[in-house]
Amino acid sequence: MRILGIETSCDETGIAVYDSKLGILINNIHSQANTHSKYGGIVPELAARNHNKNIISLIKDALSKTNSSKNNIHGIAYTAGPGLVGSLLVGASVAKSLAYAWNIPVITINHMEGHLLSTMLSNNELSFPFLALLVSGKHTQLIKANNIGDYILLGESLDDAVGEVFDKVAVALGLKYPGGLSLSILANDGISNRYNFPKPLINKPNLMFSFSGLKTSVINTIHSLSSINYQDKANIAKSFEDTIIEILVNKCSKAMHISKLKTLVIAGGVSANFKLRFYLKNMINKRKGILFYPKQELCTDNGIMIAYAGLLHLKNGKYNNLKTSIKSDWKIDSVN
Ligand code: KG4
Ligand code: ZN
């Protein structure tokens, strides 16, 4: 089976072809980071316009380079939510038009489920049920995955998402948007414990997160310094990153304790962070558990995760009629 995957939930146009026998055939990603970086964040209308401008040439390129056509594509999977309305509509319209013209199934995929299932692509030993920490620019969620399409939300952020906070602090430190990776690199030069930032909800027994107080405290600290040199910035980045990691590790440890599950998946853009993985692994080793995450190049938004999730759903007999539309706030625990 061969699936065309279309991802347009945010500011990456991801077009990919996944084949159940041959694996990843192509993973085209057009990033709009340069367009949005001058605004310090995503401008939704610009994002939609850019998807609209680029999507057809990315699809043409993907089909021709993989010798794919209506004759050997068995389904089209697209991100139907959560995400920006205008951006989602571009992907949905193109996916449905092609599926109609080619008379093949169209499969609506939840973006966070795409991140989650992409972990299975490179980890054959991963099996249900397991816990997952989903950390992206818009979401911070702890879920229990019982099976494909069967997810229970155990906890989530009451306010900002982890990736969003990385990006906002990065901008305050003068780094380019999206700044998660560059902030983490800057933190490598920082000295530990120079700043003591708040850890909201860390002592609560539940699995909820809150990051806006931490974000405000870090940004206020940056603005309170009359002058700030490279070492100051690195020290702030280090204390900030350590604080975020401590909170995430703490809540994952609680989730493992409460659920008695030994397997944890981490997925979403922030799962690309090596230090987060390292500290999660340390905690999990002590619990005699195991940590899984997607391949590095599949951590951030891409079309492969959508194509692969589409394949798994299609194999289970799940696809949609052409009337199905986008759901900009689609929750992962309501995918079925
Ligand atoms: O999943 P993703 O590509 O897009 C959304 O669905 O939102 O996640 C993007 C987020 C951004 O906030 C970006 O700064 C963050 O992932 N990110 C990182 C790292 N790489 C990407 N955050 C921390 N450390 C990283 N290495
Ligand atoms: Zn994402």
Image (cartoon, grey):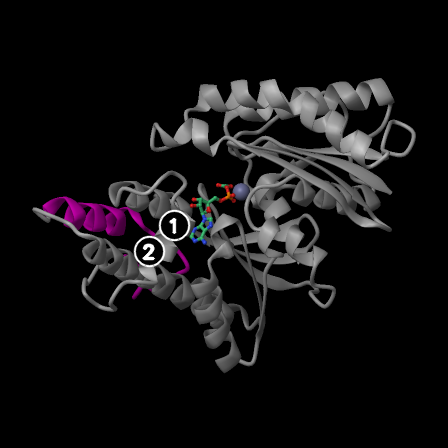
Which quadrant of the rendered structure holds the N terminus? top right
How packed mark 2 is, by other alpha carbons closer than 10 Å (few <14, some 14-19, many 20 or more), is many
Q: Secondary structure at mark 1?
A: helix
Residue on which the image places disc 1: 182
Residue located 46% across and 34% down the image: 33
- The amino acid pointed to by label 1 is Ser
**Vertical side of 335 occupied by 210: above or below:** below
Q: Is residue 286 left or right of residue 296?
A: left
Q: Residue furthest front?
A: 230
**Vertical side of 15 occupied by 294: above or below:** below
Which quadrant of the rendered structure holds the C terminus? top right
Residue on which the image places disc 2: 186
Marks 1 and 2, how far apart at CA: 6 Å
Q: Is residue 207 left or right of residue 18?
A: left
Badge 2 residue CB within 8 Å of ligand 1: no
**Vertical side of 64 occupied by 245: above or below:** below
Residue 281, percent across and down? 50, 72
Residue located 41% across and 66% down the image: 249
Residue located 25% across and 69% down the image: 192
